[in-house]
Amino acid sequence: MTVHIPFDNSYAALPEAFFTRLPPTPVSAPATLAWNADLAAELGISGTDPDVFAGNRVPDGAAPLAQLYAGHQFGNYNPQLGDGRAILLGEVIDTNGIRRDIQLKGSGPTPYSRMGDGRAWLGPVLREYVVSEAMHALGIPTTRALAAVATGDPVYREQGGLPGAVLTRVATSHLRVGTFQIFAHRGHIDELRTLTDYAIARHHPDADGPMGLLAAVCAAQAELVAAWMSVGFIHGVMNTDNCTISGETIDYGPCAFMDAYDEARVFSSIDQMGRYAFGNQPRIAVWNMAQLATALIQLFDDKDAAVEQATAIVHAMPGQLQAAWLRRFGAKIGVADAQADDQALIEGLLALMQKDGADFTNAFAALGQAGARDQFTDRTAFDDWDARWQARVGPDAAQIMARANPQIIPRNHRIEAMIEAAVAGDMTLFIRFMKVTSQPYDLKLKDNDLCDPPTAQEIVPATFCGT
Ligand code: AMP
Ligand code: MG
């Protein structure tokens, strides 16, 4: 079937310094594993074609390229990264009038591949597909998954030869903090200015100049990270090259949703120091915005004044994060418009959850129901909290909580089992997963085995980088 994609490309019209033009590298035997028909309709894409979404045929109107960027990885500046295994095919204007990137990930080497092979294997491709679509269903800004296609070629990783796959990722753009950093660090001010104007027009049209852009990105990132916290999501690699200007979650590598609540929880096998631990995410988001500020300051002649202005904007972010956190966690305990006084009540519950290792998702989902105290081991302490909570909430609490507490998240041990089955050629678990995680607030899901936390044997101690 020939697929029609109504391309309308803008990034490809930017200066050549922003990217390298090249097509994806063909693969042996493209075969569709997953196709997101709803998203395709939203994008105006008719039908699918494994040859296109594996990178074997460049569709009409595409302007394939690999984007250039840099970034701080675990706090250290890497002067050049770029799309090492991704190709931007182009952009479409969706049915809501929003410009969306269509990118192949795992589509072969590029000039930015460094030591990598430019490929992805089936496991990380399906993990990103499931988790990004689950995040969307949870109402959290994220890149989307349009297609997953098997390549028929093996990919070699520590585990040995694994089945290769290509993910088609859709984003409101792939602009990152690192896209700004590369031009700022190189002193390429004209490119930095062009990029700033482009980002404002595309994402934050009301922003007044570079400082307006900084403020808008800070606000978007504060909302995003508070939303992650509210569902127990751990991104795992919050490097500045994985931090978007749009405020969408991007790059699902060693990410995971927490089962047992733990502020210090880390999943990523490469995060030895716990830099990107659950409870550190708000601080890291602020740190990343300080890097964006540092880049944008280069646009000003009066550096002292720019530093002062940028500092004030970045210093306002912890307050924004805190306000967003309070609003979201207030809703999780059934309080709309939570006030500063409610902070202690919320923190009291989280402290109990931390002490008892309660399941984050299930404990919140059970609040106000008969089984709530069973989620805790120290029942007396819970009863004490419950009494204080009952005194605080009103008759609309259940309704508020139903919209704030998902019944289901894509649990790590289930994702691992889904990947294992898919490698063996069985996609039924993937299909089931997609179905239930698409309606996370549906109360009827309760008692579904996919809601169960892992047993001691099932706990996945670490996730590995998405390479
Ligand atoms: P990440 O932190 O996973 O987003 O990746 C950081 C950088 O490594 C980006 O420039 C990626 O394009 C690149 N990269 C990751 N995996 C590969 C791979 N298998 N081949 C080439 N480049 C890769
Ligand atoms: Mg990345």
Image (cartoon, grey):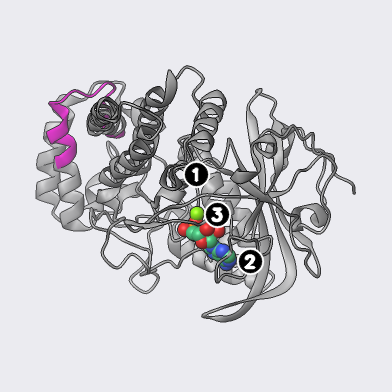
Label 1: which residue?
Answer: 179
Q: Mark 2 = which residue?
A: 119
Find the residue positioned furthest to the bottom.
160
Residue 437 visible to the viewer: no
| Residue type for callout 3 | Gly
Q: For the residue carrying disc 1, how many other residues have a C-alpha within 10 Å: few (<14), some (14-19), or many (20+)?
A: many
Q: Is mark 2 within 8 Å of ligand 1?
A: yes
36 versus 416 height, above or below:
above
Identify which residue is drawn at 84% across, 54% down: 57
Residue drawn at (20%, 45%), measured in percent from left and top?
A: 350
The quarter of the displayed image where residue 393 is located: top left
Give the total of numbered labels: 3
| 395 or 30: nearer the viewer | 30
Left or right for 40, reference 56: left
Some atom of ligand 1 lies within 8 Å of the CB belonging to the residue at label 3: yes
Q: Give the alpha-carbon distance from disc 3 to disc 2, as whole Å.
A: 14 Å
